[in-house]
Image (cartoon, helix red, strand yellow):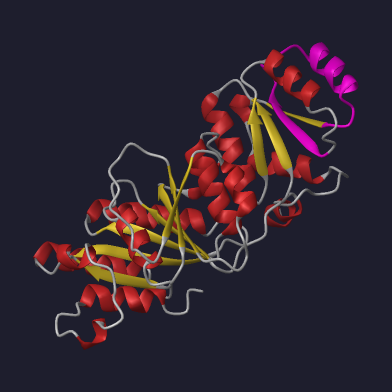
Amino acid sequence: MSEAVINKSSGRSFITAIVNSECEAEVANLLFSHGNNIIYRALTFSALTNYLTEHNNDEQLTIIYSTDLIDKSEIARVSKIFSNFRFISITPNQFDATELIASISESIRKPMVRGRDRLEKFIAVLGSPGAPGVSTIANQVAARFQGAQLIALKSDAYRAEISQINKLMIVEELNFSDKLQSDQTYVMDAGSTKALTSTLTDRRISGQLQDLVLSCAKRIIYVIRADTGGINYLAKFIADYQNLISPPAITYLLNQQRFDTAARLVNTQFLSIVNGKDHLQLPFDYRAAQRYPTSDRSKLFTYSTFSKQLDLLCKGLV
């Protein structure tokens, strides 16, 4: 019963005004994981009213507020002033996810779906926290598509040079997404995340960037470190990813694969977790990771397993 109700609630835009940060995070994760957009978090009642005043023409907004935010009389007064918005209250210590979704589903307002279309030639590379080689994999994938554009968030960290056949776009804001063209191949270095639902409700640029990935990318490549920490992150990520509505296709990549006794256990665990899912194991090869493919590489005796695996990964991506 609850699942049917949840499906009815997807695709709207929400504002949260919840005093308790843990409760707010739980509500935001719940809403986003079922296809909704959380566009603003009001930390105070005055911040909420100021935001609503500035966006009074946005008819399809729903405000989720906690009962300890302000007196009932004030909420009643504000809800009359902004009668085109829907206000839903929750009690922090008695928060019930099913009850909240049921309240949302009763709204008669037209659902608001994500505004961006998925791009057929948009590939995003994500990694678990501490996973090595996310930027390297992004560079290597882009190098296998003539004229592909590599997108990366501005950072002070060192970044290896890209292939001469590619161009690099460094971004600081999300307005670059309006300029993306459907016939251009893009590869995005999208950073790291433990779980998309929690990261995507993050209002910072990194979280918004991964929101863009989920909306626009045709395929995600999720990179993990070949150790027990990477395996733990992978299991949590997959469990979270399965809760998303209509996510892009995804490939799970075990990077810097080794073959000693401890590594063989990690390899076995990886294959068990991704059984039935698109996946790849990439061996550790520092020299190969620093080189980009050339037109005559197939003739080279030294053509590595690393390169062959990346070719296999990129085959059919766009």
Q: Which residue is drawn at 77% across and 40% down?
A: 103
On the question of residue 126 being in view, the answer is yes
Q: How many marks?
A: 0
Q: Is 107 located above or below residue 278 in the figure?
A: above
Is 95 above or below relative to 268? above
Regarding residue 275, the answer to whether it shows in the image is: no
Up-down relation of residue 57 to residue 145 (above or below): above
Q: In the image, which residues are magenta?
A: 60-85
In the image, is 109 to the left or to the right of 142? right
Work out which residue is located at the far front of the displayed protein and give it: 164
Who's the residue at 31% across and 53% down the image? 232
Quadrant where the N terminus lies? bottom right
> Is residue 43 covered in magenta?
no
- Judge from the rendering whether residue 160 lies leftward or rightward of residue 148; answer left or right: left
Residue at screen point 19% across, 80% down: 303
- In percent of width and height, residue 37 lies at 66, 43
User: Measured from the top left, where is residue 99 in percent x and y?
Assistant: 71, 40
Work out whether residue 242 or residue 307 is closer to the camera in this orientation and state it: 307
Q: Where is residue 49 in the image (x, y as percent from the top left)?
A: 76, 18
Residue 175 drawn at (x, y percent): 61, 43
Residue 133 found in image quarter: bottom left
Q: Given the current orientation, which residue lies at the most extreme bottom position?
A: 299
Q: Nearer the viewer, residue 157 or 260?
A: 157
Q: Does the magenta stretch include residue 70?
A: yes
